[in-house]
Image (cartoon, grey):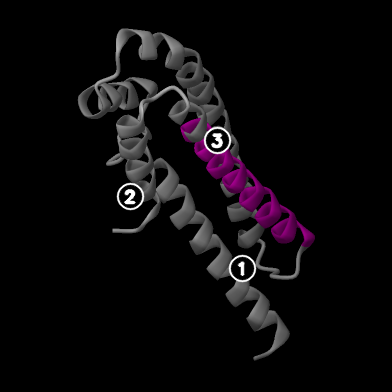
Amino acid sequence: MRRPAAIALWATATVALAGVTAFLVSRPDHHHAGSEEDFHQWMHDQLHISVEQEAALAPFEKSFEKERLRLRDEIAGAGRALADAVRQGDPDSPEIKQALTRLNSLQAELQRATLEHFFAMKEHLDPGQAEKLLQWTHDSIVPE
């Protein structure tokens, strides 16, 4: 395969993977992705969070929701930058490379923040609740 064609194929595959990753992290059928209130409701429905646990978890939820929204906004901006760079049609352009690097970095940051959030929450749950949270997290990652 010629180098420009290989780079174009790589860039297309990367964009597709980035889109799938963003979708998996933010898809609405997993209750934490929509909003703080949705995940809060899921926790009450599925984990039977006590009043004491709710008080302990509230700061984590508020902080994570703020960070998640910030990262999603930045991911959207990075996606637009990549789309603009792709429109220029040069697969070797530094703009495409920079945009891909930025988009991938932000998506990894969101995934890392999400996992750190769940593991921090787990510390405030009893073993049965923690197992349910870990199973839900697992199921959120595994494609259906």
Q: What element carries label 3?
A: helix
Q: Picture quarter containing residue 130?
A: top left
Determine whether, in the image, residue 69 is placed left or right of residue 5: left
Neighbor class of circle 2 (other Cα within 10 Å; few <14, some 14-19, many 20+) is few
Which residue is denoted by mark 2 in the rendering?
Answer: 139
User: Could you tell me residue 54's position as x and y percent?
Assistant: 37, 13
Q: Which residue is drawn at 32% across and 21% down?
A: 40
Left or right placement of residue 54 versus residue 90 in this view:
left
Residue sitting farthest toward the left: 45
State the CA–CA distance, disc 1 to disc 3.
29 Å
Of labels 1 and 3, earlier in sequence is 1
Q: Is the C-beta separation of discs 2 and 3 under 8 Å?
A: no
Disc 1, SS = helix
Q: What residue type is labelled 3?
A: Glu
The answer to whether residue 115 is magenta is yes
Q: Residue furthest bottom?
A: 1
* Mark whose residue sits in front, 1 or 2: 2
Question: Is most of the magenta stretch helix, strand or loop?
Answer: helix
Identity of the residue drawn at 44% across and 17% down: 57
For badge 1, the amino acid type reads: Ala
CB-based contact (under 8 Å), mark 1 and mark 3: no
Residue at label 1? 11
Residue 49, above or below 122 = above
Q: What stretch is highlighted in magenta?
A: 94-118
- Front residue of 72 and 127: 127
Report the disc number at residue 116.
3
Where's residue 125, x and y in %?
Answer: 39, 25
Q: Which residue is drawn at 38% across and 49% down?
A: 138
* Label 2 vs 3, first from the N-terminus: 3
